[in-house]
Amino acid sequence: MKVLKFGGTSVGSATRMKEVAELVCNGQQNIVVLSAMSGTTNSLVEIANYLYKQNHEGANELISKLEQKYYGEVDSLYSTDEYKQKGKELIEYHFDYIKSFTIDMFTAFEEKAILAQGELISTAMFHYFLEESGTKSTLLSALDFMRIDKQNEPDLPYIKENTVKTLKEKEGFDIYVTQGYICRNAFGEIDNLQRGGSDYTASLIGAAISSDEIQIWTDIDGMHNNDPRFVEKTHSIANLSYDEAAELAYFGAKILHPTCVLPAKIGGIPVRLLNTMEPKSPGTLISAKQEKNRITAIAAKDNITAIKIKSGRMLLAYGFLRKVFEIFETYKTPIDMITTSEVGVSVTIDEDKHLNDIVDDLKKFGTVDVDTKQVIICVVGDLIAETKGYADKIFNALNNIPIRMISYGGSNYNVSILIDEKYKKEALNVLNDNLF
Ligand code: ADP
Ligand code: ASP
Ligand code: MG
């Protein structure tokens, strides 16, 4: 069995859903993971923000607009009166649910329930379409088998056991449709795998059932060598290793959810990135194979905060770094980059919710400087230390851009450079010119 995930643009209209149906009905048994139709999750976030502020009028206006859009889509999706009616009832049901939150108090719990509606609607719409066209399709609720634990990490044993069980209970179908992104948390409440999390759902399901392949279908022909939103003339990369893909995803290549490569890597399952709009183009194959001696791609991670702790007295003492890291651990804030010198240490974080507390605690050790609005530029490839010349190329390209931090050596696959966000586009472009 293969797992095929289609993102928001791929299911963004009735026409697109019909194209996806053609792709997935290929004579094999497939698990189809869908995102919400494009724009829906953003609208639901906006609705939730209104509800937090008790602005019911604003929320209702947005809800009505979104609801009308869906009535239009179901009308064009189905051809029979029976399914047009089923589609209409589906939209009514989910929007009545969303509207029920405009009356009472609103907390993170209600927000997550609202955010889940996009995927619940798109998958039911798609499943009805397959049924109407005579395909043996069944709809699985991801809430029955996707779960995160108290640390908000996927509960792997639970997911494996329950995915296998759910599939077994529904033997004999050709297409199994389910929701990306949504899950339950350790308390059984509706939750999610963070924005862009449908990719993660696909790789978790793929790993749970030891699938033959995981396919991520999107609106571009695979992983490009640079961010196509900021750089012209980027090109698709035919082969990526799991490690390269993981670095690129974590450091900002939006085509993949930051942590979705790991389950596939552990299970040794190939991941293919494919283009729904150009299904024949080869896309990118992610596997254990590492191409030698090449710079593969560049990515950029936004909204980074750099924190420098200067402490001449303590830095060389053993135990100092541990104490620094413990502070970040206390506030459950991951560190992305680290650099050290004899008088200080710099780290970066992208989650700044507890920044003030962290800085207050760090002040025990010395002076603390904070730079916000930074960007990590990440160059990924087979950059082993024995191969000369890469550093020269990278830093020559960045000659005119002030560099705040540099990190190499954590792996052979990544050089990370921290710069102010105002230089991001320029940095991506000059690196593109010099490295490829
Ligand atoms: P989906 O809705 O299918 O999940 P996303 O918008 O999350 O799609 O991801 C696809 C987008 O990622 C592309 O349209 C592209 O703009 C962006 N992107 C950023 N960096 C890269 C890259 N290195 N290669 C390919 N796409 C990238
Ligand atoms: N619909 C969710 C989002 O927009 C999840 C996804 O598309 O991967 O973030
Ligand atoms: Mg995505």
Image (spheres, rainbow, N blue to C red):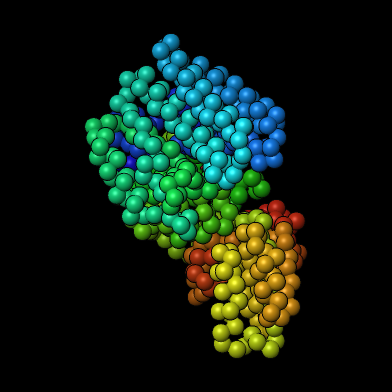
Q: Is residue 392 above or below residue 228?
A: below
Decide if residue 147 is on the left or right side of residue 416.
left
Q: Which residue is depicted at the point 54% across and 44% down? A: 109
Position of the N terminus by quadrant: top left
Position of the C terminus by quadrant: bottom right
The residue at the far top in this view is 81
Along the viewing direction, whichever of 297 and 160 lies nearer the viewer: 160
Q: Is residue 288 visible?
A: yes
Q: Is residue 13 visible?
A: no
Image quadrant where residue 349 sits: bottom right
Q: Which residue is depicted at the point 54% across and 26% down? A: 96
Q: Is residue 183 above or below residue 424?
A: above
Q: Is residue 295 above or below residue 197?
A: below
Q: Which residue is depicted at the point 70% across and 65% down? A: 356
Q: Which residue is depicted at the point 59% across and 44% down? A: 107
Decide if residue 194 is on the left or right side of residue 147.
right
Where residue 230 sits in the image (x, y, percent)? 66, 48
Where residue 59 sits in the image (x, y, percent)? 66, 32
Where residue 293 sits in the image (x, y, percent)? 48, 65
**Number of numbered discs on residues:** 0
Along the viewing direction, whichever of 131 and 95 lies nearer the viewer: 95
